[in-house]
Amino acid sequence: MKKVQEPFCPYCTKVEQTVNHLFVSCPIAISFCSDFILWYQSLSKETITLCKNQLMYGILNNLSSCSALNHLILIGKFLLNCKSLNGVKLQFANFIALLQEKIEIGKYIAIMSNKCSTFSKKWSKFIN
């Protein structure tokens, strides 16, 4: 896509930055995923494990309880990608800040479209 000068991961010396590397096997992604799982479990009181396919494609079942988790995974991957394009190491606090912003926007949309109960059902575990 010619977004960066070199095809290498900005964090790993001479490792080609593929989608799989960026979101699954890069040490930055592994660290983020570990922090994410601990954070998610502390708020949701659910034990989760995320395999490589789930990190890449999300939780592929029809349970509505996975809606928030899939959304959170997408936000994390978006942030990993943005930070890697700038060669900046992702801090977990960046994820929390972006999530709070996304939740506020979602709350506003829910209020304006009269879907507050749907919003609350999805995000209740993650709203302070």
Image (cartoon, helix red, strand yellow):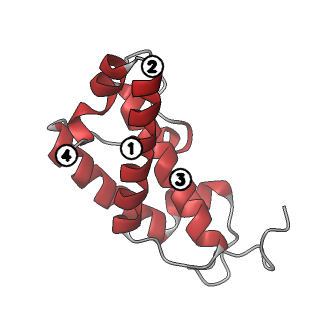
Q: Residue 14: x percent and y percent?
A: 68, 82
Decide which of tag 1 and tag 2 comes sooner along the chain. Answer: 2
Q: Residue 90: x percent and y percent?
A: 46, 71
- Residues 52 and 120: in front is 120
According to the image, label 3 marks what residue? 77
Count of numbered labels shown in the rendering: 4
Decide which of tag 3 and tag 1 comes sooner along the chain. Answer: 3
According to the image, label 1 marks what residue? 104
Residue type at numbered disc 1: Glu
Looking at the rendered structure, the secondary structure element under dot 4 is loop
Residue at horizontal 52%, vertical 67%? 26
Q: Indicate which label's residue lies in the foreground, 3 or 2.
A: 3
Q: Is residue 52 visible?
A: no
Q: Tell me the quarter of the picture where residue 30 sits.
A: bottom left
Decide which of tag 1 and tag 4 comes sooner along the chain. Answer: 1
Mark 4 Cα-neighbour bin, 10 Å: few <14, some 14–19, many ≥20:
few
Q: Which mark is residue 128?
A: 4
Alpha carbon distance from label 3 to label 4 = 23 Å
Decide which of tag 3 and tag 4 comes sooner along the chain. Answer: 3
- Residues 14 and 98: in front is 98
Looking at the rendered structure, the secondary structure element under dot 1 is helix
According to the image, label 2 marks what residue? 61
Residue type at numbered disc 2: Asn
- Residues 125 and 60: in front is 125
Residue at horizontal 30%, vertical 33%? 123
Alpha carbon distance from label 3 to label 1 = 19 Å
Q: Tell me the quarter of the picture where residue 66 sits.
A: top left
Residue type at numbered disc 4: Asn
Alpha carbon distance from label 3 to label 2 = 20 Å
Alpha carbon distance from label 1 to label 4 = 11 Å
